[in-house]
Image: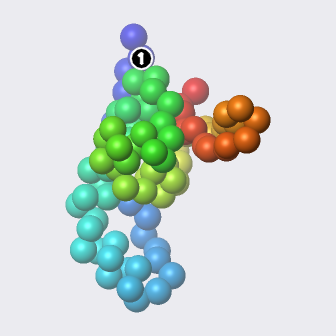
Amino acid sequence: MTVQPEIPFVIHEHENNHESRKHKEENKAKFTRECEKVYRILHSGVRLTVYDALVKYNISSLPRRCLDLKQQGVNIQSEWVTINGKRKYKEYYIS
């Protein structure tokens, strides 16, 4: 059984403009909870897509939460998946 490391789930510090900074500060607690949720889901072996994160887990910005976790040292990987040779989407996972 793999032990989950303790991570002080925090979100990124910098935003590019005033509106984005304001939005981040107003939603900091929600984004931090989403980071923790994403970490626990990925650490359990589930591979997440943006669609699955939104529909199944109510996580609104998977790529940003994954980047926040990567910046904290979590080894999140991603790969593009093709369906029927046409449609592509990215899956995020911890290896």
Quadrant into which the C terminus falls: top right
Residue drawn at 35 percent across, 43 percent down: 55
- For image coordinates 48% across by 58% down, the residue present is 64
- Horizontal side of 22 relative to 93 (left or right) equals left
Q: Quadrant of residue 92?
A: top right
Identify residue for label 1. Answer: 2
Q: Is residue 8 left or right of residue 94?
A: left
Colouring style: rainbow
Q: Is residue 95 visible?
A: yes
Residue 74 rendering spot, x and y as whole percentages: 50, 41
Crowdedness of circle 1 by 10 Å Cα count: few (<14), some, many (20+)?
Answer: few
Query: In terms of depth relative to the viewer, which is nearer, 73 or 50?
Result: 50
Residue lying at the far right in this picture: please name it.
85
x then y, percent, for residue 75: 56, 38
Residue at x 48% of width, y 36% of height:
48
Q: Residue at x 32, y 76 (%)?
A: 23
What's the amino acid at mark 1? Thr
Q: Is residue 7 above or below residue 62?
A: above
